[in-house]
């Protein structure tokens, strides 16, 4: 990082949208009342640091004059997340818009269901030329540039944008972190193109986050199939696969993943792993209550990055990430909003006593 403290703790490219969730944990197809949220995976990550007083920045794009865009901007301001991005004309009723994410939280034996509606999404057209890179990363400074595989794979334009942004940020002293977030529907008929883009970003990264499938499918690494196997088997095979990843990407300092097993929609086994400087740190899965599982992985990543930005030891970063994910799934929002660091460490240590 630069000699002076950066203005922004974490910045992230993102395509903003809204999520609508049925009230009272109903299914989408029978509900008439919904909760509206401004959302993206990347701002879910930023929300940990922004809630704890750090300045964070979303690099995005908006539809000019859209009431949905106005709602998103208002929500980001309320969450202490700054934003930069062009306002582009809608182009008529069939032009640009912000994505809709339609999801129910599930209940008991009924698992959550998510329906993404992203046609005409304005964020698909993000470009490195949309932003004053020298000012943001050179003059003002960014501690960590965080990239998600969701935005990196969203379109050919965002793939090129994220690759260029990682290069520019790394050249100006920012740490680069990459949550692989593989999605088969994004990769269909684009495998060769995206494999190259993801390799480019990973080669510039200081931290790679993802499960076995993410590393295998998004980076082309080999590894055993652990679908349906016990978590203990997943831990061992993941550690072995990361050995290959370390050889392929020697600049990476941190490799991390969550461990999750669904007991029901309302109770999960929740764990996490982190490799740093050749040493493994493991949080064995333990039960957590779940209001809404969406955003748990983003919460983990946000807590982990907060610890890395603060310069904490690796084991403390992992503990904070585990607790941030646990807090995210205990909320109907799809992001965690900690009151303070103490709240998250209380979650980690299992302290549920009243704080007066």
Image: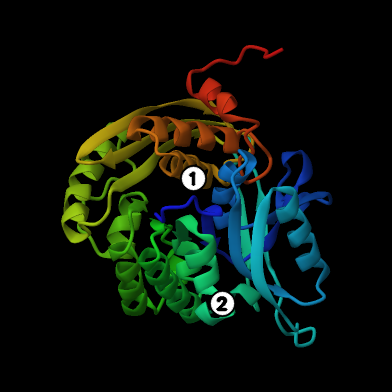
> Is residue 37 visible from the viewing direction of this image?
no
Please report the residue visible at 44 percent of the width from the left and 71 percent of the height from the top: 165
- Checking the image for residue 126, the label placed there is 2
Residue 154 appears left or right of 190: right
Task: Work out whether residue 302 or residue 227 is closer to the camera in this orientation and state it.
Answer: 302
- First along the sequence among labels 1 and 2: 2
Task: Point out the image quarter for the C terminus.
Answer: top right
Task: Work out whether residue 264 or residue 148 is closer to the camera in this orientation and state it.
Answer: 148
How is the model colour-coded? rainbow
Give how far apart the Cα atoms at labels 1 and 2 are.
24 Å
Task: Point out the image quarter for the N terminus.
Answer: bottom left
Please report the residue visible at 37 percent of the width from the left and 51 percent of the height from the top: 210
Q: Say if 306 sits above or below 152 in the image.
A: above
Residue 240 appears left or right of 325: left
> Is residue 309 visible from the viewing direction of this image?
yes
x then y, percent, for residue 42: 55, 56
Residue at the farthest bottom position: 91
- Checking the image for residue 297, the label placed there is 1
Element carrying mark 1? helix
x then y, percent, for residue 276: 27, 41
Q: Quadrant of residue 203?
A: bottom left
Q: Say if 200 sits above or below 241 in the image.
A: below
Q: Say if 170 sits above or below 319 in the image.
A: below
Task: Work out whether residue 334 or residue 53 is closer to the camera in this orientation and state it.
Answer: 53
């Amino acid at each position: 990082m630069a000699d002076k403290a950066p203005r922004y703790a974490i910045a992230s490219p993102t395509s903003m949208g809204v999520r609508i969730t049925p009230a009272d944990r109903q299914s989408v197809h029978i509900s008439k009342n919904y909760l509206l949220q401004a959302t993206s995976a990347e701002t879910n990550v930023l929300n940990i640091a922004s809630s704890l007083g750090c300045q964070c920045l979303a690099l995005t794009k908006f539809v000019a004059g859209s009431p949905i865009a106005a709602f998103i901007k208002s929500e980001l301001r309320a969450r202490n997340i700054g934003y930069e991005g062009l306002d582009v004309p809608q182009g008529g009723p069939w032009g640009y818009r912000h994505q809709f994410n339609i999801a129910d939280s599930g209940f008991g034996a009924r698992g959550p269901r998510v329906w993404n509606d992203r046609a005409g999404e304005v964020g698909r057209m993000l470009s490195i030329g949309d932003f004053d890179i020298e000012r943001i990363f050179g003059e003002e400074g960014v501690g960590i540039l965080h990239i998600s595989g969701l935005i990196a794979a969203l379109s050919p334009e965002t793939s090129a944008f994220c690759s260029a942004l990682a290069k520019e940020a790394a050249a100006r002293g920012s740490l680069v972190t990459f949550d692989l977030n593989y999605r088969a529907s994004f990769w269909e008929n684009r495998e060769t193109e995206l494999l190259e883009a993801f390799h480019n970003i990973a080669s510039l990264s200081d931290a790679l986050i993802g499960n076995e499938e993410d590393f295998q499918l998004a980076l082309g690494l080999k590894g055993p199939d652990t679908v349906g196997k016990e978590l203990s088997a997943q831990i061992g095979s993941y550690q072995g696969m990361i050995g290959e990843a370390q050889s392929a990407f020697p600049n990476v300092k941190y490799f991390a993943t969550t461990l999750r097993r669904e007991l029901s929609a309302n109770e999960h086994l929740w764990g996490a792993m982190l490799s740093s400087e050749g040493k493994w740190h493991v949080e064995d899965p333990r039960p957590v209550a779940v209001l809404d599982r969406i955003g748990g992985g983003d919460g983990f990543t946000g807590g982990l990055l907060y610890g890395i930005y603060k310069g904490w030891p690796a084991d403390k970063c992992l503990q904070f990430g585990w607790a941030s994910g646990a807090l995210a799934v205990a909320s109907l929002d799809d992001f965690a909003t900690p009151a303070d660091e103490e709240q998250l460490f209380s979650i980690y240590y299992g302290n549920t006593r009243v704080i007066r």
